[in-house]
Image (cartoon, grey):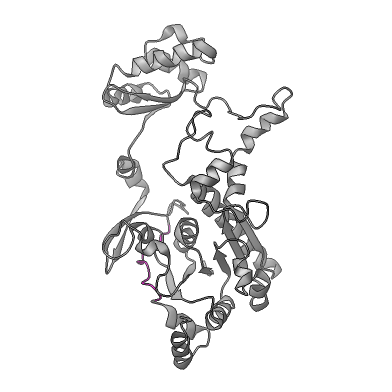
Amino acid sequence: MGVRVLDLTRLLPGAYCTQMLADLGADVIKVEQPGRGDYWRWSPPTVRTQGAQFLALNRGKRSVTLDLKTDGGREALLRLCATADVLIEGFRPGVMGRLGLSPEALHARNPKLVVCALTGFGQDGPWAQVAAHDLNYVGMTGLLQLVNGRSAAPRATGLPIGDIGAGALMAIGGILAALVDARSSGRGRFVDVSVADGLYSWVGFMTACWNVPGMEGVDVPFDAPFDKPFYSVYETADGRHLVVGAYEEKFWQTLCAALDLPEWLDRQWCGGEEEDRLRAAIAAAFKRRTLDDWLAVFAEHEACVTPVLTTREALESPHAKARGSVITVDDPVEGPLRHVGNPLRFDGHAFNALAPVPRLGADGEALLREVGYTAADIEDLRANGAM
C-alpha cells in the first residue's frame, strides 16, 4: 500500500479503522501513552497478558510511547509526521490544538499529511463536547427507534454499530479519499468524522418520505417492509428462531404454501388488527416444527427464510470457512489466536496482517532512529518522561 499511518486513537473505532488499513498493507504506528498505552491493552477479558479485544484489532501494527504533554514528546510526533501519510486521532475537539498539534501545526511539518479526527459528534455544534459512547450516539441520532424493529420500545443494541459502521468505516472512506487527493494535489486534508453524522446518513433513504405530501409530520419514518409479518423473526418448536424475509410476492406465496396458510395469500400487506392476526398465524405455524425441520422445508421451497445463528455457529459455518473469514495469528506471548479477518476481497484474496500485536512501545527506538534521533537523544526523552 505504501502508506504510513500514525494512530493516536484508543479503544474501538480507531482500532477498527486502522486494523483494516494495516490489513491492506499500511504501516500503522500506534502512538501510545507511556506506561499505560491504549486502555484496551489491559481491559478484561485478557488472554494471558493482554485484552482479547485489543489483540483482535491491533494485529501487524507497531508501537511507540510518547507523552504529548511534554515538549520532547510533541517534537518526536511532529518528526514522525514528516514521514507519515495519515494521522488519526480520537480526542475531544480542541485537545490536539491545546497540545500544539492542530492541523495547521501538523501540516507545517508535512503539507501532504491527511489528518483525521474521529469523534462522536464532530468538531463543532452544541453536542461537540458531550461525553458519550456508542449507545448514546445511536439514541441521540434517531437510530435506536429503528434498530430493534419497533419504534415504541427502544432497547440497547448488542453490537456497537455506531462506533464500527458510522465511525470506523466512514473514517476509512474519508481517509482514502483524502489520500487520493493528496497524491494528486500535494495538499493534505483535515477529515472531520463524526459517528453521529454517519448515523444520520444511514436513515436518509427513510427520511426521503418526508418529501411526500401528507407525510411531512411523520416522526419515525419506518420504511416498509421492516417488521411486517412477512419480514420478521419467529420462534420454532425447539426455542430457536427463523428470519422471514418473504417480501416479493413469489416468496410470500411459497411461504403461505409451506405454512399451510392459503387464506392469507392475497393479504400480505394487511394492516391494523388484521396484521396482528396474520403475525399470530405465522408464529403459530412456525411453533409446530423445530429449526432443523423448517430448514429442510425451505431448502426445497425458496422463500427467504433463514436461521438466526449464534455468533459461533455463524463463524464456524461452511460458508465462513469457505470465505476464509477466520484467521489465525501466532502470538509469541499469547499463543495461537483466532480472529475475524479483513472482509474485503481483491481478485479472490483477502489481505490480512498476520503479525501479532506490538508490545507497548516495542518499536519506539527504531522508529525514532528512522527520523534522525541518536541513542543519546532517545535516552534524554526517556529521562524526561517524554517516551
320 or 61: nearer the viewer = 61
33 horizontally vs 336: left or right: right
Look at the image and tell me in which quarter the C terminus lies. bottom left
Residue 359: in magenta span: yes
Residue 299: in magenta span: no
Give the percent coordinates (x, y) of residue 63. 43, 73
Vertical position of residue 32 compared to residue 193: above or below: below
Give the percent coordinates (x, y) of residue 136. 52, 46
Q: Residue sitting at 53 percent across and 43 percent down?
A: 138
Vertical position of residue 199 compared to residue 95: above or below: above
Is residue 353 at all visible to an observer of this figure? Answer: no
Q: Residue sitting at 27 percent across and 68 percent down?
A: 333
Q: Which residues are magenta?
A: 351-361
The quarter of the picture where residue 89 lies is: bottom right
Query: What secondary structure is the stretch in magenta mostly built from?
Result: loop
In the image as oriented, which residue stretches furthest toward the right? 213
Q: Residue sitting at 46 percent across and 36 percent down?
A: 155
Give the percent coordinates (x, y) of residue 36. 40, 70
Is residue 279 at all visible to an observer of this figure? Answer: yes
